[in-house]
Image (spheres, rainbow, N blue to C red):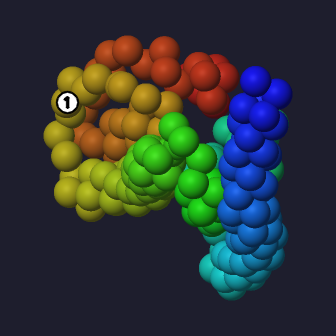
Amino acid sequence: MLTEMIVALREALGELAAAVTTFVPRLGVAVGIVVLGWVIARAAAWVVRQGLSLVPVDRLSERVALAEALRLAELPPTSRLLAGATFWCAWLTFVAQAVETMQLPGLEHARADLFAFLVQIARASLIVVIGVFASHVLWKATLLAAFNAGLPSARLMATALRASACLVIAGLVAEGETIIDRIYHLDRGYERLEEK
């Protein structure tokens, strides 16, 4: 009986030693991937920030009132926010690869789930950015078209702050009387505009 216990203990210790000898190198590689990923992610964030400094992104975000929204939300300026998002997306990609390198049971699908999440974040960010810039361009184009077209009076409905301001100005340049419904949107950004 004692012999059987010694044999079982020897087998268990052998299996433990084999598991440790396969796990430690994987752990070393995973740590190396995470560190390398951090360096590459910092470099990518720096490149994005430098690239955005060449394009007046922060000034443009001031013009479209995005900077004010970021300040109210206590977030950094647009260029720092985009550089930070670049860092986290890049670094999390390396972390996911490191976790997969460890070959831990139960984490086979973690990398695929993380990549699917990052794709959704990128899509949502792109939609927000395109929406802000498109709205900035469209309200100016609408105002210019209304001014140049010499529109007759109309009944309009305001739906948002910038759109409401655009409709007021378009109504001022139109001939005759223009009625704008739901003008309360203007009070969020332009207090007592009717008095000015």
Instruction: Report x, y in % for residue 170.
Output: 35, 43
Viewer can see residue 95? no
Q: Quadrant of the N terminus?
A: top right
Q: Nearer the viewer, residue 195 or 91?
A: 91
Q: Nearer the viewer, residue 35 or 139?
A: 35
**Side of 105 where 49 appears, left or right:** right
Viewer can see residue 175? yes
Q: Nearer the viewer, residue 107 or 23?
A: 23
Q: Dot 1, crowdedness within 10 Å: few (<14), some or many (≥20)?
A: some
The residue shown at (51%, 37%) is 106
Instruction: Report x, y in % for residue 96.
Output: 59, 56
The residue shown at (29%, 23%) is 157
**Side of 24 where 165 appears, left or right:** left
Looking at the image, is 43 positioned above or below residue 139? below
Q: Nearer the viewer, residue 192 or 82?
A: 82
Instruction: Report x, y in % for residue 155.
Output: 21, 24
Determine which residue is flagged by label 1. 154
The residue shown at (66%, 23%) is 191
The residue shown at (57%, 54%) is 103
Q: What's under tag 1, amino acid-wise?
A: Ala
